[in-house]
Image (spheres, coloured by chain):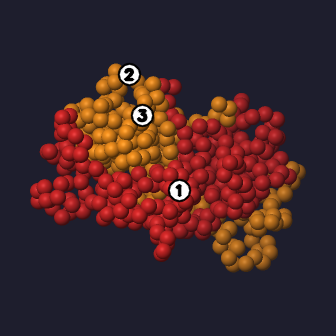
Chain colours: A orange, B red
Amino acid sequence: MYRLSGGAILWQHHPGLPAATFLAMPAEPAPAARPVAAARRRRLRADRARQLADLLRHQILAGGVPGGVLPLEDVIAADYRASRNTVRQALDLLRGERIVERQPGVGTVVVCEKYPHGLDRLQGLAETLREHGRVTNEVRTVGPVSAPGPVAHRLGLPEHADVLCVERLRRLDGLPLSLDLSYLPMDIGGELLGCDLENTDVFRLLEQLTGGPLGHAEITLEAVNADAHSAAVLQAPRGAAVLMLERLTRLPDGRPVDLEFIRFRGDRITMSGVLHRSL
Amino acid sequence: MYRLSGGAILWQHHPGLPAATFLAMPAEPAPAARPVAAARRRRLRADRARQLADLLRHQILAGGVPGGVLPLEDVIAADYRASRNTVRQALDLLRGERIVERQPGVGTVVVCEKYPHGLDRLQGLAETLREHGRVTNEVRTVGPVSAPGPVAHRLGLPEHADVLCVERLRRLDGLPLSLDLSYLPMDIGGELLGCDLENTDVFRLLEQLTGGPLGHAEITLEAVNADAHSAAVLQAPRGAAVLMLERLTRLPDGRPVDLEFIRFRGDRITMSGVLHRSL
């Protein structure tokens, strides 16, 4: 065992030794192996807890907790070959993320359900969550506005041209999922004013209006902390992590038709897809 | 003008009227148009500030602020046809996200640079950020561990089989970007122990070891708040929004070789790609 320059421990691989020679959770030093600084021990403990929390988070979100109640700490400790302290700390992290809660007399229960939004195809929210429930939209703002420079530019319009601005709070079976702001060119967007925006994806409406499928979209994803107002609208705590999607959708001929800024509640949405090494 | 059931204002589109009849920023009521509750006015002001902040954020991150100093509030107000109060509130939001700072005698300056991570192809960090600087990796943990059930399952290994666990803090030109935890099957992972993990993407090393390109990866993206320990490692504030990437990478024959849990600092990384409507 020796240290790398960054201070990490390297366990050399000894192919002749059985697995049990190595340690169950990464970076777990053998008891009293050698004196280490208290700060270093704390760091290793925190690392192990986070690493275990990542595994438990995946198991929970993948539906791998039957009945929604986690096993007892002892059982988790045995399954993951971790100490009870590590398990307790890992569960604290998941509680902090509002993924689990401790319920007296029941144990640690899963309280968060995350819904998978596809990243492989351009899809509206109702479409991508079809199997998970019914999407409804509270239309908070809708109407023409004079496009600020950057909006006009991205939509390929002259500055201060009219665009339709639509803001919707979107819910799945009544649960707030996202706050979406869209800007659309007025010639197409104006037609949306008579449509059922409360129950229909804008993508579907656009395809009905243009008579064919949409083309493609350039997207950017970021993680941001919710400002107080967005948090209140989304019924999330202030500062809650939000998955922010900026999406510019185009018709098959390349013409931009929908510039969106979407804030997804981080505790309710994941984005999943497949990436290939070669294009 | 009438209200939708959700309380939103709808401006009917009057094709005969010039754009100036409509309002520059969405949902800006004409002064004293009618008595509205104070709470409703606050909500509209907050909406406008957030909508403007989204536009400014995009402009800043797209490099649209020459010299890194924003125009005076009056100029922004004129450009975006917003009130000075709205501009001030929008800049407050961006300051809260640590995107801009107010510097006495200089003005509002851009203090955050976000780097674009490709979402179209399976790429390592050094590869995808090649044009932006040099990626170095502080190896915090490396060594064989007994794979917990879910890790073994996803890597297609028997439970408690040995896997290589590698944790790296990754920096771009010295700036912490991400904390990456990888689990690799020991037959391939073991070979990494002799490699230059501090300066080379694991993807590149895997391709050198296997003699050919990787295949594809299943990915999941989430926004989470950083726990205290991850935040400290990433040198970010506690609770900072983190873009969490889980990625299972496979060889061209489908065999899983690398299960990763990656925390990207939300204020330094965006993920960008193109989605198509038809597959």
Spatial CA distance of label 3 from label 1 is 26 Å
Q: Residues within 10 Å of mark 1 (few under 14, many from 20)?
A: few
Query: What amino acid is found at the position of numbered circle 2 in the picture?
Result: Gly
Q: Position of residue B138 (x, y in %)?
A: 73, 61
> Helix, strand or loop at disc 1?
helix
Q: Position of residue B22 (x, y in %)?
A: 22, 46
Task: Tell me whether the residue at label 2 lies in contact with that at label 1, contact meaning CB atoms closer than 8 angstroms.
Answer: no
Query: Image point 78% across, 78% down: which residue?
Result: A35
Quadrant occupied by the N terminus of chain A: bottom right
Give the label on residue A212, or none: 2
In the rendered view, does B6 fall on the left or right side of A11? left
Q: Which residue is mark 3?
A: A256
Query: Image point 55% across, 60% down: which residue?
Result: B67
In the rendered view, does A272 fall on the left or right side of B163? left
Give the label on residue B42, or none: none
Q: Is residue B161 visible?
A: no
State which mark lies toward you, 3 or 1: 1
Spatial CA distance of label 3 from label 2 is 15 Å
Q: Is residue B204 visible?
A: yes
**Dot 3: chain letter:** A
Q: Nearer the viewer, residue B203 or A51?
A: B203
Are the residues under badges 3 and 2 in a single subunit? yes
Which is nearer the N-term, disc 3 or disc 2? 2
Q: Which residue is mark 1?
A: B66
> Helix, strand or loop at disc 2?
loop
Are the residues under badges 3 and 1 in a single subunit? no
Spatial CA distance of label 2 from label 1 is 40 Å
